[in-house]
Amino acid sequence: MATLYGIGVGPGDSELLTVKAVRTIERCQVVVAPCAIEGGESIALETAREYIKPGTEVIVKHFPMGKKDRVIKALEAYEFIEARLREGRDVAFLTIGDPYVYSTYSHMLKHVRDCGFEVQTIPGITSFCAAASLVNRTLVVGDEELVIMPATKVREITDEKFIVIMKVYKHEEEVLDVLEEKGFDYVYASRVGREGETILTDRNEILRLRDYMSLIIASRD
């Protein structure tokens, strides 16, 4: 039976794919990649493109982030994948970062499993791990906890010491207000591993940039 491979391609640097990810992409007959804007660029596809062999069928599917029709779009993508699997062709579904961290991949798994197809998931380097390495900053130490949250939940911070805030775009001011109020030191990272990679610690510079592919690493004593 053909297999669907969910493949994390890392934060956007083509050199940060794992060996296993590259080998799997090379042997799949079909590659599917998501994009946030219909007709737009797929960052996952551009990251992995050099590892896709000539003759491979490549398709970009629209996954509107946080929109009401996200589930419908996931089903449409799955129906395309299902048709290829039934033909006996292995399919690679590419996802930026890791397949199980805020990923479009998760929305399709139920459809795949309900139809009895085999699924294998290959982890990828997350954007926040790549960002921490880039700025030489510890994410968490000792017996402390690391909390990973979307920017919409930033006001729920209580006594945490180590935090990663994802999906910062359009929430920059609120996030920075809360972090400063609660005594956090923070670093803002955007487009990690990609052209335009930027690291900022100045509030005003962060508010001027407001980049879609951004996150904040924060900690306090």
Image (tube, rainbow, N blue to C red):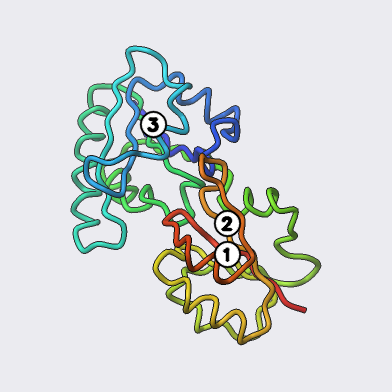
Q: Earlier in the sequence, mark 2 or mark 1?
A: 2
For the residue marked with disc 2, what is the amino acid?
Answer: Ala
Q: Position of residue 80 (x, y in %)?
A: 21, 35
Residue 86 sits in which quadrant? top left
Instruction: State which mark lies toward you, 3 or 1.
Output: 1
Where disc 1 sits, the SS reads strand
Location of residue 61 with respect to 129 vertically, above or below:
above
**Mark 1 surroundings within 10 Å by alpha-carbon count, few (fewer than 14), some (14 through 19), many (20 or more):** many
Please state which of residues 220 and 7 is positioned toward the viewer in this rendering: 220
Q: Residue at x 21, y 63 (%)?
A: 68
Instruction: Using the rendered view, name the quadrant where residue 186 is placed.
Output: bottom right
Kindly report the distance in space between the C-alpha atoms of the residues bearing marks 2 and 1. Answer: 6 Å
Q: Say if mark 2 contacts mark 1, CB within 8 Å.
A: yes
Q: Is residue 162 above or below residue 213?
A: below
Gap in Å between the C-alphas at discs 3 and 2?
Answer: 28 Å
**Label whose residue precedes the other's in the sequence (3 or 1):** 3
Q: Position of residue 79 (x, y in %)?
A: 19, 39
Q: Residue at x 26, y 54 (%)?
A: 64
Q: Classify mark 3: residues with Cα within 10 Å, few (<14), some (14-19) or many (20+).
A: many
- Compared with 52, 92 (above or below) is below
Say which residue label 3 marks.
Answer: 92
Residue topped by disc 1: 216
From the viewer's perspective, is 25 left or right of 157? left
Give the residue type at disc 3.
Ala
Marks counted in the figure total 3
Labelled disc at residue 206:
none
| Foreground label between 3 and 2 | 2
9 with respect to 42 (left or right): right
> Is disc 2 surrounded by few (<14), some (14 to 19) or many (20+) residues within 10 Å?
many
Q: Tell me the residue that label 2 is attached to.
A: 189
Residue flagged by tag 1: what amino acid is it?
Answer: Ile
